[in-house]
Structures are given as C-alpha cells and as structure tokens.
Image (cartoon, grey):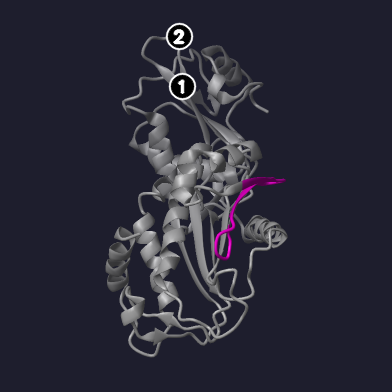
Amino acid sequence: MFFSKPISDLSHKDVEEFCKRFREGLRVEYKSTFDASVKKKLPRVVSSFANSYGGILVVGINTSKGIPQEPFEGLEFEDREPRLTVENVCREGVFPEVLIHQSLVSSRTSGKAFLVIEVPESPKAPHAIENSTQVYVRTGDSANPADLAKMDLLERLLLRRQDVLRRWDDFLLESWQFANGLNIDQRYAYREIMIGPLYPSERLLTREAVYGLLNSERCREISGFHAAQILRTPIGAVLVREENGGRYLGAGELGLLHYIEPSYPRSYQGGSKSQLDFWPMAVPIFRLLRLSGELIECAGAMCQMRIEAHLRNISGQSFSSNLNPYNSLEIKSIAQSVQATTHAPSHDIAQSAMSVTAELMYQLRWPFGAMAAPTREQVRCDLETYLKGV
C-alpha cells in the first residue's frame, strides 16, 4: 500500500511524504498541471494502471526526470470540481469503465491543492481507449511509463475477464436455488429479468446494505413489492410476494438484481392455455431499472450496466398483439424462450428507463406473429400509452 489510510483522509503532509519516497515508474505518475493536454492523457494513464498493477497519479507536482521537485505546493484548479472532470473523462474515454478513487487534498499554500487519483489493478482488464482500439500497460520507464500491450498479455487479461463474466452465472445459479427453495413456479410461461454491472468484478454493497435498501419503503414502492416478505441470504436479500403465481426479486453484493414472475396464477395446473397479455412484461422491466439506479447510486459506483429480459416456456403459448387483449390478433413464437439484451451507463439508468424498456420490449416482440413486426418507434409509443394506465 502507498498510503496507510484511505486517500479521502490524506493531508498535505501525506502527499509530501509520498513525493519524497516515490519517483515516477511502474505504479506512480505525476502531473504538474491540469490543462487540456493532461486531461487528454488521463484515459491512457488510468487505463494503463488498471491493466497492470494499479497505481497512483498525483496532479500538482513538478518533476525532473521522474523525480518530484520541492516545494510541493500543488496548483490552483480552474475546474470547479476536478474530480468530476476526471470521472467524466474516464467514463467517456475508457472501456470497460475503470474503478478509481480520488481526493482533492488542500495544500499549505492558500488556494492550491493536490488531486490524488488511485487506480486499483482491475479484474475487468484489458481496458481500452481511443474508441476501444488501444490498450496500454505500465512499463516502469519514467520517460515513457505507458506502452501498448503485447498480444500475449492481452490474451491473459481477456482470460481473467472471462472469470469476471462468470460471476453473472454464479449469482444467477445461487439466486435460482433461492427461488426454487421458495417454490416459485417455472413449469409454465414465466418472465425473468436480470440487471447489473456488465463486469461484476467487485462488491459494491455489503449484504447488510442490500437488505436495508430492499427493505426501505422507497425501494419497495419503486419495485412494486409493497407487502412482500423480505428474507436474508448469504449474498444479500430477496423479496417474495405470494399472490397469484408468486413473484421473486433477489439482490446481491455485486449489484445484481434477479426477477422471476410466473405468467399464470397458482391455480393453473397445465390445462388449456389462455391467451396471455404481452405488455405487462414492461412493468417489471421499468421498475427494476429504476430500482437498479437506486442501488448503484447508494453504492456510489460508475459502470456499464447489462440488462436482460426473457420470456420463458412459451412454446405453443399465444399472446395478444396490441394493448387491448380483447381486440387483438393472436401471436405466437416458435421459440421455447425469447431473450432481449441491452447495455446502459449506470449514471443515467433510472432516467433512461423508458428508452431501455422500449428497446427490450421491441426485441421481445420481434419473434412473435406472422405479420410485419412493429417498429421501435411504434413499440415505444405503445409502451408510453400502456405505462400511463398502469
């Protein structure tokens, strides 16, 4: 560890001692200014740390041949909130998103400060910049501390990323075990929704925080689980409602949500199949996007989100084709299940809930029926009309 305390607690003395101990190299870099040139280089610096062993960038330090030069006074930042500038530059310039910790440390010199940026080694590597065409790593050379990664390293990093992606499957497997233990019915047509970080590499919340969030009045209202029973799990918590076919919502420490809702009531025992209404699928998608926004905001995280919606066990099942199921053509799919998938940035997932829901509903609607499929715009218009009445 470079510091014996969280960087949020750093003082001028801590920064001064750091500069006296460490020169530029494999895990340390300094910048004397925060001008347009430095901001342009930020994605390369941050991604190279994340792709290697992690590191520290200190803005406000003059160097000579990689050696920090006294006096350590910091600089006057023209940006109103330089930390927000760093977040925005990295969010737009590094893919996948990279975890960073920042602190604006006041200098002993009035009006000046140091910006300390800590970047952990990332299990989501390789992180690319310049429209995902360039991958940089640290070389340890103070004259040229970041260089393009070679193919063998890229292969190792991609294999490590696959381990991160498997955490989606691990979470869903465990969540399904909880759902099965609660007798959530999957024998007939049912809906399934998953939302969470595209690369669930680190714990975003403690399980206690997950439990508190799901148990809050606001989140129960957003999710539509007002009178649900809440149960603790080893990785977080679940909400269960027993009405009709029963509904299930699981949440875990990695920021993942898993929703299951049977399309038939509990009394259904596999007789003749009724025509199901297609549009109610939009309601839990819309609600869970807003709930996911609350969870990510609570975690203070910044990441790309993966959203999936599924209609399961629908072979031979008929659905209504428009908003009025009593004045609607019957539509079917030859598929056993239909999947819709999209991505969205975490910082506006709640605000973009309508657009994301419309995209998923368009994808789900496509495989149904023999007539021409509705356009995305038609689906969005129908969706807005439908949700107004819910």
Could you tell me residue 253's position as x and y percent? 63, 44
Q: Is residue 137 above or below residue 73?
A: below
Lateral position of residue 177 relative to residue 126, left or right:
right
Q: Is residue 273 above or below residue 170?
A: below
Q: Residue furthest front?
A: 267
The amino acid marked with disc number 2 is Arg
What residue appears at the point 41 percent right and 76 percent down from the top-left corner? 365
Which region shows up in magenta?
230-247
Could you tell me residue 354's position as x and y percent? 35, 58
**Pointer 2 residue:** 108
- Which label sits on residue 114? 1
* Image quarter in which the C terminus is found: bottom left
How far apart are labels 1 and 2 at the CA level? 10 Å
Could you tell me residue 101's position as x and y percent? 53, 33
Q: Is residue 104 above or below residue 99?
A: above
Residue 157 position by quadrant: bottom right
Residue 235 part of the magenta-drawn span: yes
Could you tell me residue 282's position as x and y percent? 41, 64
